[in-house]
Image (cartoon, rainbow, N blue to C red):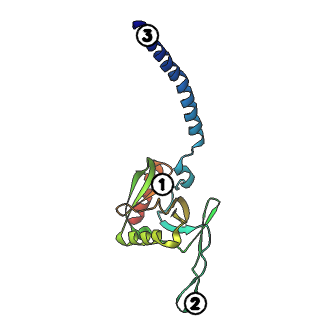
Amino acid sequence: MKLVKVLGLTVLSVALTGCGIFGSNASSSANNAQASTVEPVVASNATMVKKNGNGDIEIYVGSITKNAPKKGKNNKTITLDDVVIKSGDQTYYTSGVLLNRADVKTVFVAKAKDKPALGLRLTPTGATKLKSAINDKSNVNKTVLASMDKSVFSTMTTTEAELQDGVLLIPMLTLNNARDTADMIRVKNK
């Protein structure tokens, strides 16, 4: 009986040792493969903001496709002014500036999903404008663009741009860049 217990414990310890040796190599190689293929989310949709800007922030809601003309009262065609915004190689069509510096109450640095972010606490009017633009049925596949000094520095989907207590969190490349951007916007307000 003691011999069976000793043999059983020996087999169990050898099996666990083998799992520890071979399992750690397999899992570490899987982790290495995963780490090499996953790109940071923020890097793909955020760029550095130049420190010498004048702090003119603008928020747009746009699409990569042009809006079709809409029919108004009396079946008259209403043509919307499409403003073209370039972000890298991508072209977005918007109906113009949705929010500007006047719609921002305070600016701060934050983290969203453990990524650097610029927090904009919006005025009640600004929050209402953004909510209505995001919840518009025509904005199903639209993108929210953040622009500083006529240059887009961050893009996000309309679901990522949902307000939380009147705060819009804009993905940034680094915390330092978020701080510098917040400082420029604050100085513009004075």
Residue type at mark 3: give it.
Val
**From this viewpoint, is residue 190 visible?**
no
According to the image, label 2 marks what residue? 76
Marks 2 and 3 sit apart, C-alpha to C-alpha, by 92 Å
Q: Position of residue 79 (x, y in %)?
A: 59, 83
Residue 30 quadrant: top right
Disc 2 is placed on an element classified as loop
- Residue contact at pointers 1 and 2, CB within 8 angstroms: no
Q: Quadrant of the N terminus?
A: top left
Residue named by callout 3: 4
Between the C-alphas of marks 3 and 1, the distance is 62 Å
Asked if disc 2 and disc 3 are in contact, CB closer than 8 Å, the reply is: no
Q: Residue at x 55, y 68 (%)?
A: 62
At label 2, the amino acid type is: Lys
Q: Please, which residue is most extreme toward the top here?
A: 3
Instruction: Name the image quarter holding residue 71.
Output: bottom right
Residue most extreme to the bottom? 74
Q: Residue furthest front?
A: 1
Residue in the picture at 35% in, 70% down: 124
Q: Which residue is tagged 1?
A: 171
**Residue 171 can be seen in this image:** yes
Neighbour tally class for label 2: few under 14, some 14-19, many 20 plus, Cα within 10 Å: few
Q: Which residue is at 60% across, 81% downward?
A: 69
In this rendering, which labeled residue sits more in front, label 1 or label 2? Answer: 2
x, y percentage for residue 50? 53, 56
- Note whether 8 is above or below 102 in the view shown: above
Separation of residues labelled 1 and 2 (CA atoms): 41 Å
Closer to the eye: label 2 or 3? 3
Sequence-first tag of 1 and 2: 2
Looking at the rendered structure, the secondary structure element under dot 3 is: helix
Quadrant housing the C terminus: bottom left
Task: Specify the label residue 181 is tagged with.
Answer: none
